[in-house]
Image (cartoon, helix red, strand yellow):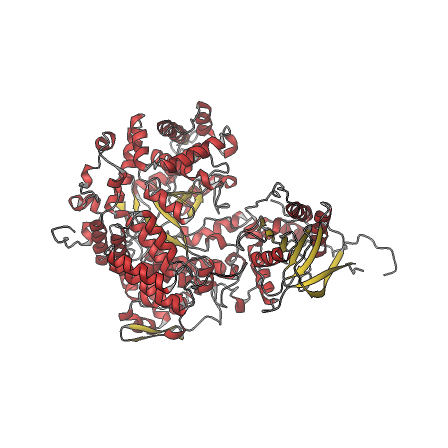
């Protein structure tokens, strides 16, 4: 104490091995202890209510230990709309272990499980999935996923909101297999131009791919109503009344909005996820999964066809507590076991560790979900305006290899370079024609060349942003619709692209895409839980990766030929 | 991506209450509003920037514009917009800077709606000493009726995996320090050398 | 509205665009098969022709019922009613349902308008239910303007 202060950082000596471990990327991730009293706990909390339900006069009068007088608005909505009153008492009285067994027993059909799950309270659902380990959760998912054929969804955005980039990347993404593509903006006023680019690019890559533009409700709905986008998903719901109100909504306002989308023929799903309530400081002392189950049942009650969940933008919270990813896998299962389309997360930057990023996706990728990622970044993460995804363009070959290794269908495939270049070039040219037709700021030959070979937004000539923003405003002012895009494409000789887009627009009139888990196949057949129901009944049944699709997924960038090992097949 | 490291001098700060916060009359003042656990239950931000350093930089940024600063603590809420707006209404210039314990910061103005703001710095892990100084400077310029360039915001996609859960935990702890019904108090910052050795 | 009673659909009729195109019409009465490229190019089609008709939503509601999805069917029935409401008013109604956005009287008025002007009893019932819950949970607008600041 008497010597002059020295810069003493005299930490105890570390082993060389510890130094190596300290430097591993996983140690950049954040981990915290549980705090169940505040809801900072994944799914095992003594503060969650015990299941109970009582029906009087055709109405649920007690739910999970609360009587109707004490219901908050989530309880009320779930009791009034989500739970089947006829079977509630009988189903909730069944032993949880029996229901959990039904979920994994291949001898019990999906429909038989649904006959029970529709009568369960939120606490009862939690009680059931708490009995399941992660392998059992995956088994359950394999059977309970609504659509038999799994699919994937991509993000197509640009750090500069460059519409040419979005069109080219959408075309490549569609070609690689995404059934749905989603964009959003840095500068919101760019939205109409970028949404047009996404739609045109997607229809170049593969006719029938559905597109959306995530914005605030009014503009998102308007772009949908005009046929510039085809579906919507960023309609957030929350598991406690107080957080729901903080989001300036209620279960009734969101239900009204759900019907508004359907009334315009637009496919829509809600978004929720574990961790959002505790992140906002109002978990009311309940576990993350219990609150998420309330969201899932609220979505069910609203009559929306599906839900994007799997923590989504809060993944850092469950990702930091013990058992967090088990809870995330469980929330996807619960969405599926109450018969909702599930777009299952894996859509936000999650870990510094490549090993952990991969492991995070296995409970969705291996059993298959309606959309394994609710946003695989089909642009480099630096261009991802959803703040980065768990996977991006650099991971394409790894993803394809994992599909091939395990013979699982994660919705993507390897595509040859020449096909990709052709699609990117055509998308940029098609957009050039549409912009010319609509008298929007022109797209130059340099930009088309750049789009053909680019990786990121840095590889494109800079746009005149002010001119583009004026153009974007004029798209709104002039009331441009999807039909104008069709006309522009047709008149410039892009007949196939024009026909693809018109067919997507025509689907709106039929309403077929409003049914649960609906997507459009390459030959424009609506494929939903009605005509492609998951019929898994044990080994050898359900969706199997085989035939032509398996041949597609056997292809990788580099595979040595067995006929002539001095060459590669491709 | 890198996150700022605390290279600040080894100083600590405590806040001494000097009475109820009053409405200022000087048009050349900025009120800095501190959250319930700032320089109390907590002593540093989410990335270990000492609260002493946060305050020192904010004050320096304000003073270098020839504007005076006044400190208050808001005790009955941990909501940054509410803290900042309360302080803006106490400020003679109508300009305030609100700071949460974990570092999240906002510049507010009394005539704006509570849920709006002049500048918001939501990503607490990316706020280091130079940023706090620029925030102080900008707040002072607003107080003088100028229109400064907003402080450049940073973005780090890997902040989520690293900091999201800790931020939630710090938020919950700050909530625990709320004393409902207590009015804001005027405080003095008492800086001292850290006690090491 | 339509003269003939709607057919009884089963899940085998899905997708309607492929299996039952003869049932599908635009709100302006054109058959879905009239939505061709020729019609687009010649300017016969307007954006109005690419909207869904209330009758189609009722058909999709039948399919949802037939596949054991009563909540989805109810959503389609509300949607069928909403096809009559102009875009701006739909959004205004949604905003009116946000927390503390409307008084009890305003919500009652909204329900009455849905029922009276738009023949939308299912939507009206949803609004009335909301009004009852909002009253109990302190989510109605306070009649006097907030005096804060």
Count of marks, rendered view: 0
Q: Is residue B58 visible?
A: yes
Location of the C terminus of chain B (image quadrant):
bottom right
Q: State the image quarter where residue A505 is shown.
A: top left
A236 versus B175 height, above or below: above
Q: Is residue A152 visible?
A: no
Q: Where the N terminus of chain B falls, by quadrant?
A: top right
Closer to us: C47 or A96: C47
Q: Looking at this view, is B57 or A520 the one in front?
A: B57
> Could you tell me residue B140's position as x and y percent?
67, 47
In the foreground, A299 or A224? A224
Q: Residue at x 50, y 58 (%)?
A: A318
- Of all residues, the one furthest to the left in this rendering is C4
Q: Position of residue A274 (x, y in %)?
A: 46, 59
Residue A340 image position (x, y, % from top left): 33, 56
Q: Residue furthest right?
A: A2
**Residue drawn at the location 21% of the way across and 43% of the way down:** C26
Image location (x, y in percent) of residue A185: 46, 41
């Amino acid at each position: 104490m008497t010597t002059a202060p020295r810069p003493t950082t005299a930490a105890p000596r570390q082993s060389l091995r510890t130094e190596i471990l300290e430097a591993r990327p996983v140690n950049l991730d954040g981990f915290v202890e549980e705090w169940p009293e505040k809801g900072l706990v994944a799914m095992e909390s003594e503060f969650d209510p015990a299941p109970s339900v009582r029906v009087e006069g055709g109405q649920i009068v007690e739910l999970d230990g609360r009587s109707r007088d004490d219901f908050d608005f989530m309880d009320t909505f779930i009791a009034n709309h989500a739970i089947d009153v006829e079977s509630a008492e009988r189903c909730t009285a069944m032993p949880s272990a029996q229901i959990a067994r039904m979920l994994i027993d291949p001898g019990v059909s999906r429909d038989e499980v649904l006959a029970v799950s529709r009568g369960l309270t939120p606490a009862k659902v939690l009680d059931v999935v708490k009995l399941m380990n992660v392998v059992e959760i995956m088994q359950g998912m394999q059977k309970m996923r609504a659509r038999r054929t799994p699919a994937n969804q991509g993000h197509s955005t640009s750090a500069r909101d460059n519409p040419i980039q979005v069109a080219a990347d959408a075309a490549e993404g569609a070609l690689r297999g995404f059934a749905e593509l989603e964009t959003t903006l840095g500068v919101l006023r760019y939205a109409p131009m970028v949404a047009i680019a996404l739609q045109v690019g997607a229809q170049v890559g593969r006719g029938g791919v559905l597109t959306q533009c995530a914005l605030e409700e009014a503009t998102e709905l308007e772009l949908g109503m005009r046929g510039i986008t085809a579906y919507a998903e960023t309609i957030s719901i929350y598991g406690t009344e107080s957080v729901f109100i903080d989001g300036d909504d209620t279960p009734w306002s969101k239900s009204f909005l759900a019907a508004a989308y359907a009334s315009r023929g637009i496919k829509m799903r809600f978004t929720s996820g574990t961790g959002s309530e505790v992140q906002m400081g109002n978990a009311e002392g309940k576990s993350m999964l219990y609150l998420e189950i309330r969201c899932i049942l609220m979505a069910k009650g609203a009559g929306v066809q599906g839900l994007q969940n799997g923590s989504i933008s809060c993944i850092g919270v469950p990702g930091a507590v013990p058992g967090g990813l088990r809870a995330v896998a469980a929330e996807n299962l619960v969405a599926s076991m109450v018969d909702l389309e599930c777009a299952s997360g894996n859509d936000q930057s999650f870990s510094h560790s490549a090993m952990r990023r991969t492991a995070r996706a296995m409970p969705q990728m291996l059993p298959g979900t309606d959309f394994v990622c609710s946003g695989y970044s089909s642009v480099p993460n630096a261009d991802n305006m959803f703040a980065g995804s768990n996977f991006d363009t650099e991971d394409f070959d790894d993803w394809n290899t994992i599909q091939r290794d395990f013979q699982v269908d994660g919705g993507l495939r390897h595509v040859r370079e020449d096909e990709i270049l052709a699609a990117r070039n055509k998308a940029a040219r098609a957009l050039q024609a549409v912009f010319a037709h609509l008298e929007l700021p022109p797209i130059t030959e340099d930009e088309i060349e750049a789009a053909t070979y680019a990786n990121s937004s840095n590889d494109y000539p800079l746009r005149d942003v002010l001119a583009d923003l004026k153009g974007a405003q004029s798209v709104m002012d002039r009331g441009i619709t999807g039909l104008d895009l069709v006309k522009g494409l047709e008149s410039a000789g892009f007949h196939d692209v024009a026909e693809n887009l018109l067919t997507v627009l025509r689907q709106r009139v039929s309403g077929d895409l409003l049914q649960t888990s609906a997507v459009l196949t390459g030959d424009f057949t609506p494929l939903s839980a009605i005509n492609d129901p998951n019929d898994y009944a044990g080994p050898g049944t359900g969706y199997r990766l085989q035939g032509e699709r398996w041949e597609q997924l056997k292809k990788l960038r580099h595979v040595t030929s067995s006929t002539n090992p001095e060459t590669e097949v491709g | 991506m890198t996150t700022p490291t605390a290279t600040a001098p080894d100083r600590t700060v405590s806040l001494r209450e000097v009475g109820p916060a009053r409405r200022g009359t000087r048009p050349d003042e900025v009120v800095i509003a501190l959250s319930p656990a700032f320089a109390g239950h907590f002593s540093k931000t989410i990335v270990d920037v000492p609260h002493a350093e946060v305050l020192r930089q904010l004050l320096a940024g304000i003073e270098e514009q020839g504007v005076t600063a006044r400190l208050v603590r808001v005790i009955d809420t941990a909501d940054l917009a509410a803290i900042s707006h309360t302080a803006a209404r106490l400020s003679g210039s109508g300009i305030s800077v609100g700071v949460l314990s974990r570092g999240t910061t906002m510049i507010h103005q009394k005539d704006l709606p509570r849920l709006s703001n002049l500048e918001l710095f939501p990503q607490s892990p990316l706020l280091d000493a130079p940023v706090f100084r620029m925030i102080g400077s900008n707040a002072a310029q607003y107080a003088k009726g100028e229109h400064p360039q907003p402080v450049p915001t940073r973005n780090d996609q890997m902040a989520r995996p690293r900091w999201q859960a800790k931020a939630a935990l710090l938020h919950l702890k700050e909530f625990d320090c709320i004393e409902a019904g207590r009015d804001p108090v005027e405080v003095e910052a008492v800086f001292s050398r850290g006690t090491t050795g | 509205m339509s003269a003939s009673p709607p057919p009884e659909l089963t899940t085998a009729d899905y997708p309607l665009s492929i299996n039952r195109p003869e049932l599908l019409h635009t709100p302006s009465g054109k058959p879905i098969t009239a939505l061709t490229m020729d019609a687009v190019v010649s300017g016969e089609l307007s954006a109005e022709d690419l909207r869904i008709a209330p009758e189609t939503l009722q058909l999709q509601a039948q399919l949802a019922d037939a596949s054991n999805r009563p909540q989805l069917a109810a959503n389609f029935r509300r949607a069928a009613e909403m096809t009559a409401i102009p875009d701006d008013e739909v959004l205004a109604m949604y905003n009116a349902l946000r927390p503390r956005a409307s008084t009890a009287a305003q919500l009652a008025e909204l329900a009455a308008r849905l029922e009276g002007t738009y023949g939308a009893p299912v939507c009206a019932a949803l609004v009335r239910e909301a009004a009852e819950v909002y009253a109990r949970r302190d989510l109605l607008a306070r009649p006097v303007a907030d005096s804060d600041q």
